[in-house]
Image (spheres, helix red, strand yellow):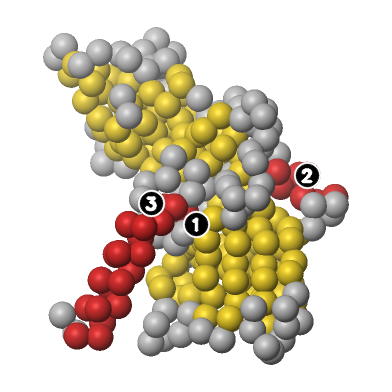
Amino acid sequence: METWKRWDLPTNEGTRIHRIGDRRVCVAADMVGDQYVLAAMALPPEASKGARLSLPSLSDEAWTRFYMDKAEGYELAPAYPPIPTCVRLKQPFSMAPGSTVEGWVFSRVEACVVVGGARVAAFPLATPYKTLYGSPEAGVICRYDEEEFLAAAEPVASSLHADQRFVAHPVRLRNASSEPVEVSDLCIYGEQLSIVGGETSMRSERLLFVFSSSGVRMSLDGQAPLPPGSRVLAKPTVSGEERFIVRSFELFKNITRI
């Protein structure tokens, strides 16, 4: 993909502008003594309007600065938000007891500047809002997102697949309860997922959501192999087992009020 790749440090061209949807990620290079300094910042959509683009000086605190021994370049990589994402469905739907539904749901990524494997800065590609997934007693603070749940054959799915702001999640939903279930939002734990890129799109592993009387459980569904020729743009930051241990400890703290 044209945007998500390794770039040389812009030592002789001023500020490089990466356009991702309606966001602009700016990367510049400076010298302090014998060290290179990489400076990065993201502009909100309203700053991208108009013919002229006025940027602050590289000493301004709006820039994130990173000192480098040499001009080794940087990577622009997609990344999941640091907290789970609650995807609110624009059109909720009902599932009968014992039924299964397959389709796609999309969530927004962040743009990450990476130098030598170290994450220098991460910029949301949409204004970040937070929401609560679940009940007030047992909810999870999430990044808020709002998208359609789409069948593979729907025409709009192809345009979302090609939008570099989004990662596509193939999902399988199963109602394991004895009552009808209304699906209105899905909580996606990006820390457990990869981002795999093809020529024009990004996707994660297939997800399985099981609705039961005790709640909703997300897990990886191993029945969908990744497309040939894809490359991994982002790896999981934590395994499912590690996440289970952390969640158990969080629950223990809430129960014992530590």
Give the crowd class for mark 1: few <14, some 14-19, many >=20 residues within 10 Å.
few
Name the spot of residue 242 as percent of width and height, x first. 32, 57
Task: Find numbered disc 3 in the image and state the secondary structure of the residue it sits on.
Answer: loop
For the point 67% across and 71% down, which residue is it?
A: 174
Mark drawn on residue 239: 3
How many marks the image carries: the answer is 3
For the point 45% across and 76% down, which residue is it?
A: 132
Separation of disc 1 and disc 3 at Cα?
28 Å
* Residue 194 position (above or below residue 37): below
* Front residue of this view, candidates 53 and 73: 73
- Describe residue 65's horizontal placement relative to residue 207 as left or right: left
Mark 1 or mark 2: whose residue is earlier in sequence: 1
Name the spot of residue 22 as percent of width and height, x first. 60, 43
Mark 1 or mark 3: whose residue is earlier in sequence: 1
* Front residue of this view, candidates 124 and 102: 102
Give the crowd class for mark 2: few <14, some 14-19, many >=20 residues within 10 Å.
few
Mark 2 or mark 3: whose residue is earlier in sequence: 2
Q: Amino acid at mark 2?
A: Ser
Task: Find numbered disc 2 in the image and state the secondary structure of the residue it sits on.
Answer: helix
Of discs 2 and 3, which sits in the foreground? 3
Q: Amino acid at mark 1?
A: Thr
Task: Find numbered disc 1 in the image and state the secondary structure of the residue it sits on.
Answer: loop
Point out the image quarter for the N terminus. Answer: top right
* Residue 181 position (above or below residue 52): below
For the point 36% across and 13% down, which residue is it?
A: 11
For the point 23% across and 21% down, which residue is it?
A: 68
Point out the image quarter for the C terminus. Answer: bottom left
Which residue is tagged 1?
Answer: 127
Q: Quadrant of residue 231?
A: top right
